[in-house]
Each structure stands twice: as structure tokens, then as C-alpha cells.
Image (spheres, rainbow, N blue to C red):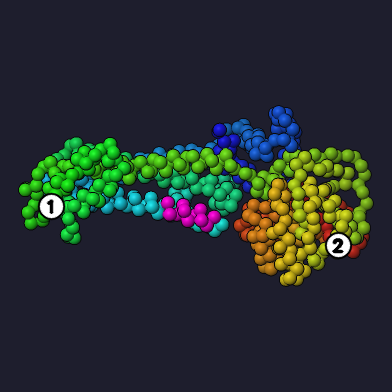
Amino acid sequence: MKPLWNYKDIFDLEFFFHKDSTMRNESLVQRDRDVYLHHIEPTLATPATAQDPGLLLHRWLEHRRQTEFGARGSLSPGTLFIESRRTLRLVILVFGLFSGSIVGLGFFNYAGTTPVNIFSFLVFFIFTQVLALIALLMSAALRSLLRRRTIPPPLAVRLIADLITRTILWGHRNLLGRMWADSRDSLAASIGLLKSTQKIYGSLFFWPLFALLQVFAIAMNAGLLAATLFRILTSDIAFGWQSTVQFSAQALHRLVALIALPWSWCFPEGVGYPTLTAIQGSRIILKDGISTLATGDLVSWWPFLVLCLLVYGLLPRIILHVVALIMQRRCLNRLNLRHPPCLNLLQRMQTPMVSTQAAPEPRPPATELVSETVAAGDKVTPPMRRRTMLALIPDDIYPAFTEDEIPDLLDNRGYSHSGTVRFMENYEKDREVLDVLRRHDWTGDCGILIFMESWMPPLIAFLSYLGEIRQSVGADIPIVIELLGRSTPAVSALEISEGDWLIWHRKITALGDPFTNLAPRQVQPAVEAAPAPPPTFILGTGTDDT
């Protein structure tokens, strides 16, 4: 079955997410809701609640791509990535063929006086490739044993990744020139985002690089094989063996028979590899030269060397390339877009918002917590796809909440309330909280919502404890941090300040955890100042935050 998503889609999706990160949340809510109602919902054969979230995201992406790039005829980042990869594959293929041919022609530059030493051929062209394959298999086994630990990819893969990035940004200047300036900036940022999204996409972006590495190996082996056959067909090349280490022809025959085992069933001794007599007759003794050696013995090695290149050089690389293509398709079929930007988008699309003309409500009393995001006269109904959230509230602001308010707060934000946990009391209590989180059932669409004071910068103790929470719940459970503002004598200052939000945003982003995010900051329209009751906490995020 053809995967719904491809690499072009993923690049474009991350591009649009980065572009949307600079927009006001109110604009995103209105835009995505309109896209869903007018362009996605009419095309669905079944209700949205029965649809795969990946399908909804893909329909949204197709509409955005058509709107952003279809009308003005510019290239999307995903298209640029695909074209760059094709160009790079062609360059690698040509370079590999050229390199293999040059190396092969240089190695078989036979002057007619000294035969080609088969030991040199085996060491340079066969044994090195076999050792590389063994190292690759051992690395794969090590990765499977240490799934929870981060192991850097092979050096060759990292070099190709850097080469792809440079090809996109440098080798396609004519294509970049067809993109708008803001698109070029967002493309560069989206590439940077993809470098740090290993936790989201896993090995998805490893396999294209691995496939390119195999293309180079296939091309180089093909060039080497072509050069070998060319020299054999157009020159009278003699092959022999010699070594300072004195070992018998019988030992070499056993080694050759072992190497030829994969093809000995169809190319037996004397055809696929030399006989013991031929091996004895092709031994080179420096003081004697080659005048006393029989021509039949000296040329009996070339079928063995060619088959070694085919079986131990070219064939394994072809198999690995096919494996890489299969793994690409498997990873795309298993792609589960559950990181916060995707969940935020799904909630924005599926959260109905009904506007009324009711008069603004009076300000709440000082002890009541108020949401900034629901303007006076607006009612936000629960979303069709609700996520169950466990609320974590710090000890110092926990008394400001009542038991009945917390479920209502989560309900207004499109969440189902699964419980409330008080934390940051003391060391022993925090250990108990971690135990509670470990035992909690995280199956299904669930996550954690943490309320924090915006004017208090994230301290090292909190960030460290946040890391312990992540270890307790798992790597892909969404953790949303919702900041609380506080009222002041100036009513216009009810919203969370931009400086406080940016401090939190930089700190949370620096954690490098794609499933831990800060809820968007809402902007409260300024109104006339009026006397206000004593300070109280004001929630600073909207119903679409996930």
C-alpha cells in the first residue's frame, strides 16, 4: 500500500509549522477552522471523529500548499528537497562510476614484467568492503540492543546529510531565486528543525541518506568491475601471488575455496576459482621471475576476482539499497504525527467556535481564575477530538484553585480532566509524584498539562524535574506548559508579557524535547484602566493549545 505521507509532505509540513509560529494564535484558530469547514469536511466520506488524524493533516497540507505555492508558481521546500536529492543522487552515481573506473584502471596498469598480486586486490577491494559490512551489521545490532540510548549515525551518513543541506542551499540557487524571501528564510529554518527532530521522526530521515551511501558504493563497485573486465579483455594480464610470510599453497587453496563458497555450487573448482595445481603454478618467486610460470596458471585467477567483486562488493550494496527503500516505505507507513504542532492544528480545526452578540461580562472576583482566550460574548464548545490531560499544579499556587474549577478550565480548553496532582512541595512528595506518573495509564490520546507562573522564570530545579517527568511518562507523551498571568491596577496588563513568554519559550525549546511545548501566548486587547481587586492568577492560553 502506498504511504499517505512522503518526504516532500514532511518538509512542507515543518515549513508551514515554522511559518505559523510567528503568527498570532487568534489568526491561526480562525484560519484553520475555516480551512476545515470549507475545504476538508465537505470531502470526508465519514465524520471527522472516525477519520485518521493523519488524513486530516494531509488534507490541510494540500490546501496550504496549493494556496501558498500553487497560485504564484514558486517551489515549496518539499519540492526543492526532492529535486535536490535527485540531483545529488545523479552526482553521486557519476562520481562513484568515475572513481571506481579510475581506481580499477590504475590498479591493473600491467607492464608485462610483474603479475598482479591477488593479495593486494583482495585486501584493497574485497576485505575492506567485507569489514565495512561487518561493522554495519554490528552497529545495527548495537542500536537494537540500546534502543533507549542515543547513538550517533555513521560518519558517512552524517557527511551525506551535510552534503544534502549544502546542495539545497547552494546548488539550487536558481530554484531558491523563485521563492519569496520569507519562504527562503523559513526553508533554512525548517532544515534546522528537521536536524533536531530525531525524536519525532526517528529513523525516517536516516534511510534516504543510507540509500544515497549505497548508491555511491554500487556505482564505485560497478566502475571497478567495468575497469577490471576492460583490462582483462583488452590486455594480457597475469595474476599471481607472493608474500614474505612463507605459507603453503594448500593453505591458500583452502582460503580461496572458503571465499568461493557462495558460488561454488554453480561455478566449481577450475571455473569459479583456481585449482590447487593452478595456485602452485602461479606462485611468484622474486629471484626466478615469471618466465618459468605457465600462462594457464597465471590467468586462472581472473574469474575468481570478478566473482569476488560481484558477490562481496556489488551484490551486498544492491541488497542494502533495496532494504533502505523498503525501510523508507515502512517508516512512512508507520508515521505517527503526534508532536505538539500537529495536535495543536487538529484541535484548531476541530474546535467549533460560536460567536454571539452578548454584552461583555463584568470582571470576575479576585479569587476566581479567568481565561484570557475566551473574549466576552464568545463561547467555545468542546472539540470533537478531546485529549485526556492530567493537571500538574505547583504547591505555591495550588490554593488559588478549587476542585470544581480545574475540570472546567480543562474543559474550556478542549481537554478531558483525568486528575490533578500537586507537585513541587518537597523532595519526598515530588518522588511520590513521579511514582504516580509512572503508574498512570498513558494509553490513548492523553498528556500532561502543567500550570506555571509566567513572571517566575524557569529555574534549573523545575527544568531538571521536568526532565524526570519525561523519563517517568515516556518519550512521546505530550507535556503542555500553560502560563498564568496576574492582574495589576492596569487592566491592560492582564495578559502575559511578551518578555516573560519569550524567556519561557527559549528555555523550553532549549530542552530539545519535541513533545514538551509551551502553550501559545494570547494577546488581550487593551481597555481602559479601572480599579482592580487584589492580584489573582490569569490563564494565558487558549482552547486550541495541546
Q: Is residue 8 above or below residue 516?
A: above
Q: Which residue is mark 2?
A: 400
Residue type at mark 1 is Ile
Q: Position of residue 229 (x, y in %)?
A: 23, 38
The answer to whether residue 530 is seen in the rendering is: no
Instruction: Give the residue at x 10% y 56%.
Output: 286
Q: Which mark is residue 475?
A: none
At mark 1, the secondary structure is loop
For this rendering, which residue is in front, 187 or 381?
A: 381
Q: Which residues are magenta?
A: 137-147
Instruction: Give the residue at x 92% y 49%.
Output: 361
Answer with left or right where residue 34 lies relative to residue 209: right
Dominant SS type (magenta): helix
Q: Position of residue 388 (x, y in %)?
A: 76, 49
For this rendering, which residue is in front, 184 or 438?
A: 438
Which of marks 1 and 2 precedes in the sequence?
1
Front label number (2 vs 1)? 1
Residue type at mark 2 is Ala
Answer with left or right where residue 396 lies relative to residue 7: right
Marks 2 & 1, CB-CB < 8 Å contact = no
- Give the crowd class for mark 2: few <14, some 14-19, many >=20 residues within 10 Å: few
Based on the picture, tell me whether residue 36 belongs to the magenta stretch: no
Q: Is residue 59 above or below residue 445?
A: above
Instruction: Give the residue at x 80% y 58%.
Output: 420
- Give the crowd class for mark 1: few <14, some 14-19, many >=20 residues within 10 Å: many
The answer to whether residue 374 is seen in the rendering is: yes
Instruction: Give the residue at x 82% y 48%.
Output: 411
For this rendering, which residue is in front, 534 or 121?
A: 121
Q: Which image quadrant: the N terminus?
A: top right
Q: Which residue is mark 1?
A: 284
Name of the residue lying farthest toward the bottom? 427
